[in-house]
């Protein structure tokens, strides 16, 4: 991620907009301004290891809102702050929406070398119900992120952190 602050601001703006939009309208929001991808972006079949089930694939995301966040468990600032903000927004909707319609929050690790399923489970549990993690080894991770228009890059540091 070249500019983590920009990514954080975009995710924050989305979460705040989602929160207030769902607070003020009981049904679907009217479309005012949007970019509609016609046809919708196709996502090739994928299989990720998940902390919720053995595998996460295309069919697991059908008929349920899922906010997908890309990060890693050793991220010191942006990832925990964003996940907590998304979790708080989800919790604030609990009084207004049936539990089966609350969005899930999925952290997809972009550090598969260090983020094991166990590490993702311990990390995502901290953020509460509805938050879970997934991972994939290369090249599956690259293919999945490419289909979603996500770019990431590991930058090796001297202390292997």
Image: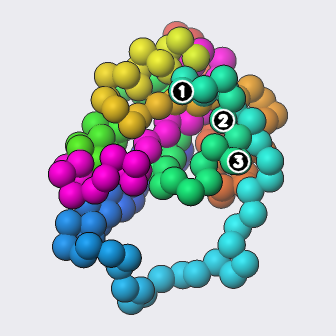
Secondary structure under the numbered disc 2 in the rendered image:
strand
Question: Which quarter of the figure has residue 115?
Answer: top right
Q: Rounded to the nearest whole Å, what is the CA distance between mark 3 and mark 2?
A: 7 Å
Residue identifier under label 3: 58
Q: In this view, does 65 lie above or below 82?
A: below
Q: Are marks 1 and 2 in contact (CB under 8 Å)?
A: yes
Q: Residues within 10 Å of mark 3 (few under 14, many from 20)?
A: few
Res 81 seen here: no
Label 1 or label 3, whichever comes before in sequence order: 1
Magenta segment: does it hold 104? yes
Q: Main secondary structure of the magenta part?
A: loop
Which residue is identified by label 2?
56
- Name which quarter of the figure residue 112 lies in: top right
Tell which of 102 and 108 is nearer to you: 102
Q: Position of residue 39 (x, y in %)?
A: 72, 78
Mark 1 element type = loop
Q: Is 23 contained in the magenta span?
A: no
Q: Look at the image and give the residue range highlighted in magenta.
A: 92-116
Q: Which residue is drawn at 53% across and 12% down?
A: 118
Q: Mark 1 points at which residue?
A: 52
Q: Gap in Å between the C-alphas at discs 1 and 3?
A: 15 Å
Q: Whole-Å distance between the Cαs marked 1 and 2?
A: 8 Å
Q: Where residue 42 sits in the image (x, y, percent)?
A: 75, 63
Q: What is the count of numbered marks?
A: 3
> In the image as oriented, which residue stretches furthest toward the bottom?
32
Q: Could you classify mark 1 by the number of other residues whose Cα lies within 10 Å: few (under 14), some (14-19), or many (20 or more)?
A: some
């Amino acid at each position: 991620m070249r500019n983590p602050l920009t990514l954080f601001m975009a995710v924050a703006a989305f979460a705040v907009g989602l929160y207030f939009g769902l607070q003020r309208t009981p049904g679907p929001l009217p479309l005012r301004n949007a970019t509609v991808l016609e046809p919708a972006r196709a996502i090739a079949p994928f299989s990720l290891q998940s902390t919720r089930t053995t595998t996460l694939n295309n069919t697991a995301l059908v008929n349920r809102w899922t906010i997908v966040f890309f990060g890693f468990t050793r991220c010191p600032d942006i990832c925990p702050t964003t996940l907590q903000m998304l979790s708080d927004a989800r919790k604030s909707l609990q009084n207004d929406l049936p539990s089966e319609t609350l969005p899930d929050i999925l952290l997809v690790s972009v550090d598969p070398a260090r983020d094991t399923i166990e590490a993702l489970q311990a990390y995502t549990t901290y953020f509460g119900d509805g938050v879970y993690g997934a991972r994939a080894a290369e090249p599956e991770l690259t293919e999945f992120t490419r289909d979603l228009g996500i770019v990431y890059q590991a930058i090796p540091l001297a202390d292997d952190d």
